[in-house]
Image (tube, coloured by chain):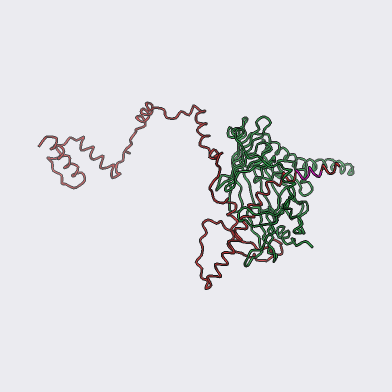
Amino acid sequence: MTKAHVNKLDDQNLSALLDGEEFLTDQEIAAKESATLGRYALIGDVMRAESENDFVLDISDSVAKALESEPVYADFSQKQDTESTAVASDNVIAFNWRKPLAQLAIAASVAMFAIVGVQTLPQDDNSPMNEIPMLQSTPLTGVASPVSYSSEPALENAEKGFRELQQQRIGALVLEHQRQARVAYSLEKAQTKAQAEEEKK
Amino acid sequence: MKFITLILSLALMAPAYSSDEKSAKELLLNMAEAVHNRNFDASFVVVKGKSMEPYRWLHAKQGETELEHLSLLNGAGLEIIRIDNQVTYFEPQSAPYSIATDSIAGPIPEVLFKNIERLNQEYDFVLGGKGRIAGRPAQLVRIESKDEYKFNYWLWIDAESSLILKSAYVNHNGDMLEQLQLTHISVTEEPAPLLLEMLNKEFPTPLPSDAIAKNTDNLASNNWQIGWLPDGFSLLKSDRHKLDLNNELTDYYLYSDGFVEVSVFVQRPLPGRRPSGALSSGATTIYVHNAGSFDVSVVGNIPAATAKTIAESVARPL
């Protein structure tokens, strides 16, 4: 047995003693340095959170020292550089000039007008708004189709088909309105110009 | 003495009233000028009921050339680019095309950037209160319809830059149906580099606007009688064409009162039970009317009651 091994074994005894796993014998205590005993006692107290003197680890000095010797990864004093990186990650740049918006589904504005059913509003007062039945609309995405309990599946399917046709039509109408409205202003200007010319004659 | 005071107070009040009216209009004219002359980069959202659309809006004036870019940032998207008198639309599922016009038909009515004097007959311009919008002091200007057949439009204008900060379609109960709100704006001295890049790109050549107006090949104005429209609306075009999305044939009529557009479609009836009814998304109303042997649909930023009356007034010519 080497000396180091003996010491280690003794330490194990001491640790076991402090944890109350072994009984105290005079010989073992006398053989130990008091510093080791004190250190072990402190560890035990801290682990059981019994220590009255708060155990504070002050590493701020060493961190500060370490930071001083760190290399510079980002220099915020060079404003020009950071601005150019901000622009490069801008969401608008994503627009591809040569092949924009290809291969994407129908515009969201069209999908918005899908009809799921017809509901007549209660007519409890006389305002004209309340006499108008509202077709209920929901987005196309994420609509759970209910299980059909109809005893006539053929009729149910036909009804569904008609509804789809109407949905398609309304989507097409809204898109067409949006597109036609784009020429409205120039048409109107051309019209008023023509009128003005006629009045001159 | 009392008489003199009365005259004096009248004399003092009269200009106060007229300057009120004038300054609401002046603010709008200032806004139009600011939108055409400043370099800015803005983001805004359009809230329609439960849905929301975010946009980015850039504008620059490079010498005498105006550059503008409006892009819808969600979904399939939409890109609109204007270089002076040419507006190009990039849309999903169709080839880009250009129109010869000097304003973008986006979520903000075009006339607001133009000559608002032509709205005098149908709308009143009223100065509202002051408030804080998008972090800036703002002045409310209300464009109020003189009858109940159209919506009102409210605008909040930046007190410093005169740029638009918020706007809303408001019904006659005072409910905001569709709101547009700027979330960010930066006004710069220099034009954005992204816009200058546009000058080097090639865009489709637009049809001259006269050609669109004079295109009478498929004139449909005699096919149907549209019995009623609110005062101030006039027919801009009518034709028979196929719809892009479902290839259905339609007789088409486009009306405008200078502020909002209304489309009237007359189509072959759909099979099955076809209930008449309205659909709405924000300020946009779609009224589908089953007239027995034909279907009439009315689309536009108008109240459902107005759309219903228009749709029901459509009849076969005598």
Q: Which of B165 and A171 lies nearest the eye of the viewer?
A: A171
User: Is residue A187 in the magenta section?
Assistant: no
Q: Is residue A149 above or below residue B158?
A: below
Q: Quadrant of residue A96?
A: top right
- Chain in green in the render: B
Residue B310: % across, % down: 73, 58
Query: Can residue B158 be seen at all in this image of the molecule?
Result: no
Residue A197 position in % (x across, y down):
82, 42
Q: Quick check: can you spot residue A123?
A: yes
Residue A39, picture quadrant:
top left
Q: Position of residue B83 (x, y in %)?
A: 65, 36
In the image, is B268 to the left or to the right of A42? right
Name the residue furthest bottom: A151
The x and y percentages for residue A134 are 64, 62
- Near-viewer residue (B296 or B12): B296
- The residue sitting at the front extreme is B217
Quadrant the N terminus of chain B occupies: top right
Q: Residue at x 68, y 66 (%)?
A: A124
Position of A185 with respect to A83 (left or right) is right
Which colour represents chain A? red
Q: How many marks?
A: 0
Range shown magenta? A190-195
Q: Residue at x 63, y 67 (%)?
A: B273
* Figure check: B150 above or below A101: below
The image quadrant where one finds the C terminus of chain B is bottom right
Seen as rendered, the residue at the extreme left is A1
Magenta part, dominant SS: helix
Residue A191 is covered by the magenta coloring: yes
